Image (cartoon, coloured by chain):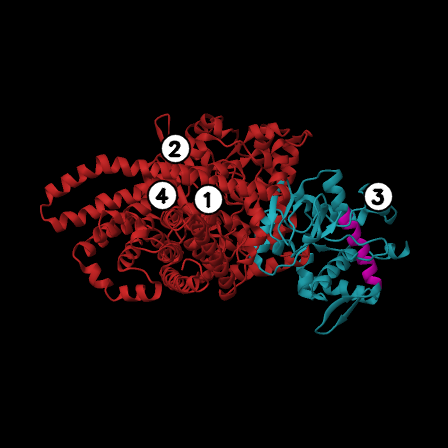
Amino acid sequence: MRCQVWEPVSCHAVLKKFVQKVDETVALAGNPNVGKSTLFNRLTGLEAITANYPGKTVELNVGVAKHDGKTIGVVDLPGTYSLDPASDDQWVARRAILEERPSVVVVVLDASNLQRNLYQALQLMELGLPVVIALNLADHAEKIGLKTDYGKLSKLLGVPVIRMVASRGEGIEDLLEYLTKRHIGPTFPEGIPFERSLERAIDTMEEAIKSDLPEAPLGLAPRALAIRLLENDSEFMELLRQEAHASRIVELAQQLSKSIAAEYHEAASLVIARQRHGLARQITEAVQVHADQPALLSQKLMHYAVSPYTGIPIATGVVTGVFVFMLGVGGILSDGISFLWGSFASPIIRFIVTAVFPIRLISQVLLWGVDAGVLAALSVGIPYVLTFYLILSLLEDSGYLGSVAYLADTVMHKIGLHGGSIIPIIMGFGCNVPAIMGTRVLPTKRERVLASTLITLTPCSARSAVIMAAVGFFAGWQYGAAIFAIDLLVIGAVGWSLNRLLPGKPAGMVMEMFTFRRPRISTILKRTWFRFRSFMLLAFPMVTIGSLGLGALYETGYLQTLLAPVNPVIYTLLGLPAVASICLVLGILRKELTLQLLIALAAMQYGPSASNLLLFMSPLQLFVFGLVVTLYFPCVATMSVLGRELGRKSTLAIMASTIALAILIGALAYRALPAVGILS
Amino acid sequence: MPLRDAISQVLEEYLEAIWRLQERSGSAKTGELAQQLQVTPGAITNTLAHLEKHRLIARKPYRGITLTDKGQTIALRVVRKHRLAERLLTEVLHMDWSGVHDAACELEHAMGDEMVRPLEKTLKEPTTCPHGNPIPDESGRVREQESEPLSNFNPKDKAVLVKVTDEKPDMLRYLASLGLMPGATVEVQEKAPFEGPIIVKVMGATYALGRSVASVVQARRL
């Protein structure tokens, strides 16, 4: 739900509290990939908190910078191309600025792409906010032969302009000096001059607003509101329609927009956008000289990365490399953590818990949570998720991911998505949780539902471990590979059908292609840390509490009672032994638990030699088990993130359909494979 | 040029304004015309009567005002001058964006017909004004802009965007905020086979556009 507040009050308690604690607040605004987060990290260090607008999945990072004994709250807005409320991130960026009323908006611009970057800067100045411009990536701009006249830019815009290379810390001190020492007033009080006939319309609107509306929504300056209304900004139009005295203003805006459209032969919003671009171009031409340079290595690399003959082999190599690295390094780390935990942490925890709670039932249940549960979170989180984030941040910072998205677009279209959604789906191979969070970058709910559903079917590192260890090791590697292949086919088929079932049309891809850059270690490490932390904050409590709950059911014996009616179904349909159904239920905590439990429970039932799974399960049973584990219901952490991102209804639908799908395909495999002489 | 001498600058303004409105909605309504010319509806009645007397416009009840062939010829000549003047002001004189339209309004009346062709040559035969609107040719024809979907273009092609045939205003506006709007010059950089996406450079930034997007963006080859 969007909160409809008129006064400039924070939508979000975190932000509000935060704003009160510091001497002043500044917001960082800018296009995606201009080094905004790098600047944010430089200013605030690692102690940042993440805030959400209710109902919006776009997150804001807030942190504190200290300079000269003053504390400055820094709000890092989502990277956006404009302030139209066309997408969630743009809506949040605009809302945060209007509601939090930062004392200064630091607009971070990419000096090597000034013209396009200036568009949003001009929009911000139209809002009448005090602005400081940080011209970042200045080193890159200079390298490609762009000379910038900083003084002239500052004079033309009427705002301070700072040369910045945030990754090396250049310009940070200057910025802090500006923020703490000098008073930066609202810029361009007269506004940015549009063409005269447009200005006349703005003036007329402004007069009407001043006389009819004592308080503009969100404390917007009359001129700023006038422009937004002429642009037919749906949000402000809606806000005004709820206002009693504003009907004349709405009418006037519609009338003036019409006559602008008649004069310029295009919609008023386009006329305004065009003139902003024109101004941006004029300013850029006035302050930047371009010296011709030979094509940079990065441009040539880009060509090779996107041309089909070279690009597809490169992408295949990179993706394979990522998985090999992740599973290799992840496997070693996972073993290491389990070993260390088993040798040191676990005995201590066991000792303390059993000493404090002498009743066996209670201590056993608690141990499910604080021993097995914590280990579960750590042994997936650190080896697989952390490793994966590290590689992902590296690829992201280098600018390579755009090429993968470009190459994947054609195929993704067949399943109702576009190239951009390949990135969250690739993330899903590491862990579904961050992958689903990553679907936020997709513009429509339809795409988010589609991508999230497909992600829940993507074999994450935990499921890959089960497939490789249980099926690949005992039944043969070709059967392990077959499960991956079947899974990919299922993903394709589900995507293909959902694309036809879901109302609406697939959205087209519009994605900026960033030039390749040398990745910066500090940026990568910090980004990895932020992502990992937000994953752990979500997954850790879910896994621990989930473990406690299931532990209680298991230790009290209720689980077996509950499962009693299920076992025959599992046996009849899937041909799996009774122990398997307990494993499958407990596997909702995390998927590789199914394998560990299978071995442990089997050992309890059949004696220690049952760690060779073939003693009590046939290769066919192992294959069906691996298949079902891969397809059925995502783990609790995935479920909780799904619930947060898509709502309860979609989550339940996804849950139910994946369970049905897993049983269906498992049952089919159990019957069909022996019939054709495979695994019989 | 007897025709030119016969009518004043004010009448030219009127004909130009009527042409703009007629282009948009088939005819001009008195109220709309007054609004465009920034005068009261009452004030234009006399001038309209004068234009009708010279058979430059036709007025029909409930249908509004339309230009006669004679009126249209004059209007297009003025529009041609206006749009060329805008080009001159932005490209040669690097004039401030905000004043171009009004300055062109002054220039269009001062510009003799003999100046137009040389100016057009100097400006390297532009086909549109800085806003992307077509410049009528010498014979007063508004050239139909030959455009084709951006998806038809190949790497190294340069094109001017003519229009975006997508009805969703959000998409239009989003593309516009990126600079993908009529009049923008794009350079195709890469194109994927099998209905894949296309990479274009516009205003110094590089975007990958899916084929479904590229096929609704109409462009003219340069």
Nearer to me, A623 or A53: A623
Residue wearing tag 2: A44
In three-dimensional space, the C-alpha distance between marks 1 and 2, rounded to whole angstroms, equals 17 Å
Q: Nearer the viewer, mark 2 or mark 4?
A: 4
Residue type, numbered disc 4: Ser
In three-dimensional space, the C-alpha distance between marks 4 and 3, rounded to whole angstroms, equals 62 Å
Quarter the N terminus of chain A occupies: bottom left
Residue type, numbered disc 3: Lys
Secondary structure of the residue carrying tag 2 is helix
Q: Is residue B25 above or below residue A3?
A: below
Q: Nearer the viewer, mark 3 or mark 1?
A: 1
Residue wearing tag 4: A534
Secondary structure of the residue carrying tag 3 is helix
Residue wearing tag 3: B121
Residue B123 placement: quadrant: top right
Quarter the C terminus of chain A occupies: bottom left
Q: Which chain's residue wears label 1?
A: A
Examine the residues drawn in magenta and state their main secondary structure. helix
Per the image, is B202 magenta? Answer: no
Q: Is residue A551 above or below residue A657?
A: above
Colour of chain B in the rendered structure image: cyan
Colour of chain A in the rendered structure image: red
In three-dimensional space, the C-alpha distance between marks 4 and 1, rounded to whole angstroms, equals 16 Å
Residue type, numbered disc 2: Thr
Q: Which chain's residue wears label 4?
A: A
Magenta stretch in the rendered image:
B70-84
